[in-house]
Amino acid sequence: MAVISAGCLVSRSGVNGAEVLLVHARGASFRLPLFGIPKGVVEPGEDLETTARRETHEETGLRVRIRASLGDVRQKSGKVVHAFWATVEPESETAIDAAGRCGSPDAENDVCRFYPLAKARELMIPAQRVFLDRLEERLG
């Protein structure tokens, strides 16, 4: 049975257009496109949206508002990832600096930061890039 996870593609308005939040797993290579959305395994009794919000908060410190489903993908590992488009809740207390970096990425990730869409596409693992396509369709 495939592992099922859920997470959020968090967007915001940047100086030059939309930006999205990506995380990089601690210890992973920086030479390969290994950035992705904050996500995690669905716990028993938990729905996908709850998992996505919880994991995003645990990995980034941000509280988010789900805007829409971006569907799911199956990664090379066989894991099924469900993604939701989300925005940061106004009362979220995590500091994000001028460069778009989260003030405190968790122990699982060494980078937590907002990137312009084109840069995000370069950095993301290939299986998750479809979430950017789906977000861009929604943003028009």
Image: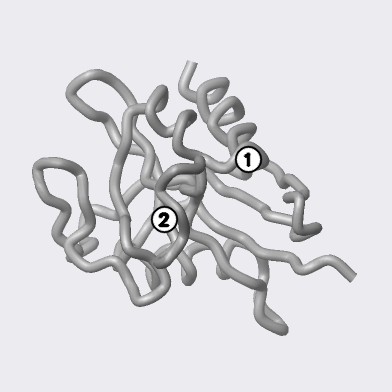
Q: Quadrant of residue 7?
A: bottom right
104 on left or right of 69: left
Select label 2 or label 1 by which is in front. Answer: 2
Tag 1 residue: 70
Q: Nearer the viewer, residue 58 or 24?
A: 24
> In the rendering, which numbered label is found on residue 83?
none
Q: Is residue 67 visible?
A: no
Q: Nearer the viewer, residue 11 or 98?
A: 98
The mark total stands at 2
Instruction: Name the kind of residue labelled 2 in the image.
Output: His
49 on left or right of 19: right
As helix, strand or loop, the secondary structure at mark 1 comes to strand
**Image coords of residue 5 (percent x, y):** 66, 64
Q: Residue at x 31, y 55 (%)?
A: 112
Q: Residue at x 62, y 44 (%)?
A: 69
Tag 2 residue: 24
Determine the CA span between mark 2 and mark 1.
20 Å
Q: Quadrant of residue 129?
A: top right
